[in-house]
């Protein structure tokens, strides 16, 4: 059978692992990149191959949204329908509002919302996601979706009976390993919303079975206060709201990262998210464990939890990725818009090349898809985009 080959060229080719190449081109053969370089060189070596030219354009890699909750894409409409127009006042207020609104929903809502999230991500030029799913039965919507990455099945809870039931359900779902182009993994939600025993179990399972894992960590000062002293708004408002008022754990006296370490959660395959409240000592622990961290600056800004210590993280050598988080705390699912916001938010500590790396190779490494996506290099998938004002042309 004859191989399907094409040369793609534009004013600029940005491969993601080198400076932009003026008049660059890539040779795609059967969906894989076979060569990259100046158009004249690629043409000379492949004289019979058809050339597709995009004048006045830039060819760039698809972006990586390393942390999102696509099942919540319709959240703004749900909030309106539930009469929850008022913006929440801070982190715990936001969680309580999220719980109230989620209690008005059926599986149909989540199905439609997840489909919308997949479509909006693709339209925004995203090629892979680290997507958190609390409604595990919606996972089948990933069959046929043109998105790679990891679908993290979310777990939380403190009640041992309920936890045992969920563990059984997760065991059978995880046997599927892959849905469409996404791998299945686990997401213990956050150290404040899951018992230490269950958190340790999940980390042991992920390490032993090499399952992708992700954890929200050090997102808010309320979380730090709860982990260290078992007090604050999470103890006084969130725990009673979900019926856990008798399940508040004793104070650990630890920072969230130290607590995670005690639960066996510091390993490279546990993708950390947020890290807004990290201290220098915690950053050093994360760097020593060779862990990746996803920053979600627009979500952090909306929830008024602060700004991640980016300069310290970069200095410690932590690989950073970028995520939009969900539509419950963001305006859209565009990683381009997340980059634009981060450029303003972290001006002085994050330059444009570093941001582009976070949204491409950094994110691909964080999700373990760097062998196929993250840059336009020989041997990787020949999928790319031509960004434009209103939409991304995707190939
Ligand atoms: Zn999240």
Image (spheres, rainbow, N blue to C red):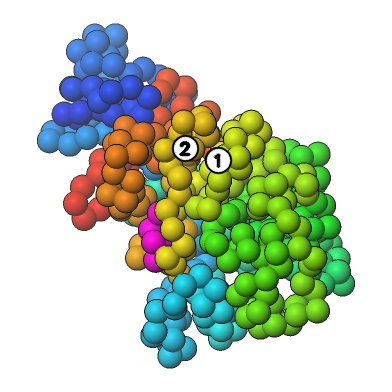
Of helix, strand and loop, which mostly describes the magenta segment? Answer: helix
Residue 312's disc number: 2
Q: From which residue to which does the magenta span run?
A: 297-302
Circle nearer the N terminus (1, 2): 1
Q: Work out whether residue 143 can be spotted.
A: no
Residue count near mark 1 (Cα–Cα under 10 Å), binned few <14, some 14–19, many ≥20: few
**Disc 2, SS:** helix
Identify the residue position indicated by label 1 in the image.
280
**Disc 1, SS:** helix
x and y percentages locating residue 301 in the rendered image: 39, 61
Report the front residue among 85 and 130.
85
Report the front residue among 51 and 117.
117
- Look at the numbered discs 1 and 2 and tell me whether their residues touch, using CB distance below 8 Å: yes
Quadrant of image for the C terminus: top left
x and y percentages locating residue 256 in the rendered image: 65, 53
Compared with 160, 387 (above or below) is: above
Quarter-wise, where is residue 96 in the image? bottom right
At x 38%, y 24%, the residue is: 17
In three-dimensional space, the C-alpha distance between marks 1 and 2, rounded to whole angstroms, equals 7 Å
Q: Is residue 195 left or right of residue 212?
A: right
């Amino acid at each position: 059978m004859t191989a399907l080959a094409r040369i793609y060229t534009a004013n600029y080719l940005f491969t993601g692992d080198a400076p932009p190449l003026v008049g660059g081109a890539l040779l795609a053969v059967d969906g894989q990149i076979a060569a990259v370089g100046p158009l004249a060189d690629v043409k000379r070596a492949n004289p019979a191959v058809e050339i597709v030219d995009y004048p006045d354009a830039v060819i760039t890699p698809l972006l990586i949204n390393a942390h999102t909750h696509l099942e919540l894409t319709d959240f703004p409409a749900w909030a309106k329908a539930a009469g929850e127009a008022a913006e929440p006042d801070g982190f715990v207020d936001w969680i309580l509002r999220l719980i109230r609104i989620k209690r008005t929903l059926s599986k149909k809502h989540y199905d439609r919302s997840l489909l919308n999230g997949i479509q909006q991500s693709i339209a925004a030029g995203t090629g892979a996601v680290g997507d958190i799913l609390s409604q595990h039965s919606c996972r089948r919507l990933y069959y046929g979706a043109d998105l790679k990455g990891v679908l993290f099945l979310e777990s939380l809870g403190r009640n041992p009976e309920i936890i045992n039931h969920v563990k059984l359900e997760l065991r059978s779902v995880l046997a599927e390993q892959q849905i469409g182009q996404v791998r299945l993994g686990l997401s213990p939600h956050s150290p404040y919303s899951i018992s230490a025993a269950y958190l340790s179990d999940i980390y042991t399972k992920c390490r032993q079975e090499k399952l992708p894992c992700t954890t929200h960590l050090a997102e808010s000062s309320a979380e730090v206060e709860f982990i260290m002293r078992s007090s604050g708004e999470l103890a006084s408002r969130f725990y009673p709201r979900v019926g856990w008022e008798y399940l508040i754990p004793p104070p650990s006296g630890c920072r969230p990262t130290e607590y995670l370490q005690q639960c066996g959660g510091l390993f490279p395959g546990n993708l950390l998210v947020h890290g807004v409240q990290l201290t220098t000592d915690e950053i050093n622990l994360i760097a020593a464990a060779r862990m990746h961290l996803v920053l979600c600056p627009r979500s952090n800004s909306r929830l008024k939890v602060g700004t991640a210590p980016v300069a310290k993280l970069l200095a410690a050598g932590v690989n950073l990725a970028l995520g939009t988080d969900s539509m419950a705390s963001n305006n859209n699912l565009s990683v381009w818009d997340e980059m634009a916001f981060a450029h303003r938010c972290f001006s002085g500590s994050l330059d444009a090349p570093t941001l582009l790396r976070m949204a491409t190779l950094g994110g691909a490494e964080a999700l373990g898809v760097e062998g196929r996506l993250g840059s336009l290099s020989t041997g990787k998938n020949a999928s790319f985009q031509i960004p434009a004002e209103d939409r991304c042309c995707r190939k």
